Image (cartoon, helix red, strand yellow):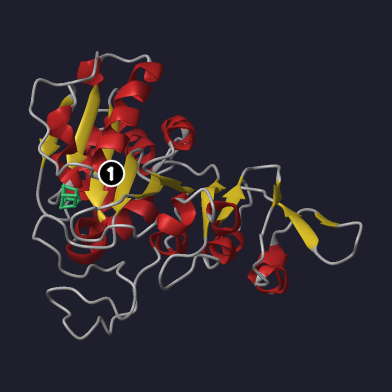
Amino acid sequence: KEYVSDQEVRWCPGCGDYAVLAAFQGFLPELGIKRENVAMVSGIGCSSRFPYYLSTYGMHSIHGRAPAIATGLAVARPDLSVWVVTGDGDALSIGGNHLIHTLRRNVNLKILLFNNRIYGLTKGQYSPTSEPGKVTKSTPMGSVDTPFNPVSLALGAEATFVARTVDSDRKHLTEVLRQAAAHRGTAFVEIYQNCPIFNDNAFDAIKDPETREDAIIPLVHGEPIRFGTDKRLGVVREGFASLAVKEIASLPNGEADLVVHDAHTEDPAYAFALSRLTDGGVLHQAPIGVFRSVDKPAYDDLVREQIETARGHGSADLQSLINGSDTWTID
Ligand code: SF4
């Protein structure tokens, strides 16, 4: 109850956003920080109403620009826990540029991307994650676009923490939030989120108890990856992932190999290869879990370090540096 705001929640009945909100409200007390030190920044879209429903500080900001606003906040206020809430349209279409630069900079903030593969707020147009051939109001003959795989995109920008989870799996979602919160730098979390009004059942294959066993490829650091019936393991092993696979053990029957997942692998090519196991069309299969978690200096820490260094020098020193007439030694 501690993090529940007094605002009326205005999502459609059955929306996956409710489950994410409940999980997040349940998780926040674990951070052990004051409510006023949690900042939620969102863009525009259904998911971007999130900050209203938490009794933290927050900003329902500009379409696609939440990562830029949150970057400023993270640099100026290192005492805050800064979270971005966005959707597939907000983050990957109008906000694509801001997203990738935040990821490559490794700003100390957490980005939750609710992916429902449709524009919900504007009533059902295809989005950057809609599958090819998707028939919507704006694509009456089917989408001819190639969709983004958000996890691949984040890994392409060399994000230091990249994960995927599902709205309806509270236990898994909470565990991913826990790991994201503990990460220093940008933590990018894609959440498969059902939109029952405009794109219902988009994730049925990975939610249905009868199919989920084959559809989900669980990623747990230090655990063998179960590839189910998919035969693309060979692609992972013999392609870029061979750079990074730490341990391969043959099964006794010799029919298949196991790859022990190492989320701490420095080269993002390994996690990228795993991300390609996501079915690009109608979703029948997807790796779920933490793809990558590596250490790298955070942008805002480095900026503050420079400011502190600059404060230790006189203005004449700084002018010399700007003019290029002197060299500066930074300890
Ligand atoms: Fe949720 Fe879809 Fe309704 Fe938006 S349109 S609130 S995503 S169910």
Write the residue at 43% across / 65% down: 283
Taking the image as shown, residue 141 lies to the left or right of residue 265, namely left
Say which quadrant the N terminus sits in.
Answer: top left
Disc 1 crowd rating (10 Å Cα; few below 14, some 14-19, many 20+) is many
| SS at mark 1 in the image | helix
- Amino acid carrying label 1: it is Gly
Write the residue at 54% across / 63% down: 272
Q: Is residue 318 above or below residue 90?
A: above
Q: Is mark 1 within 8 Å of ligand 1?
A: yes
Q: Is residue 22 above or below residue 4?
A: below
**Residue 223 visible in rendering:** yes
Given residues 131 and 41, the one toward you in this image is 131
Q: Is residue 42 above or below residue 252?
A: above
Residue to which mark 1 is pinned:
16
Write the residue at 70% across / 65% down: 243
Write the residue at 46% across / 42% down: 297
Residue 93 location, x and y as percent?
21, 66
Residue 152 location, x and y as percent?
45, 64
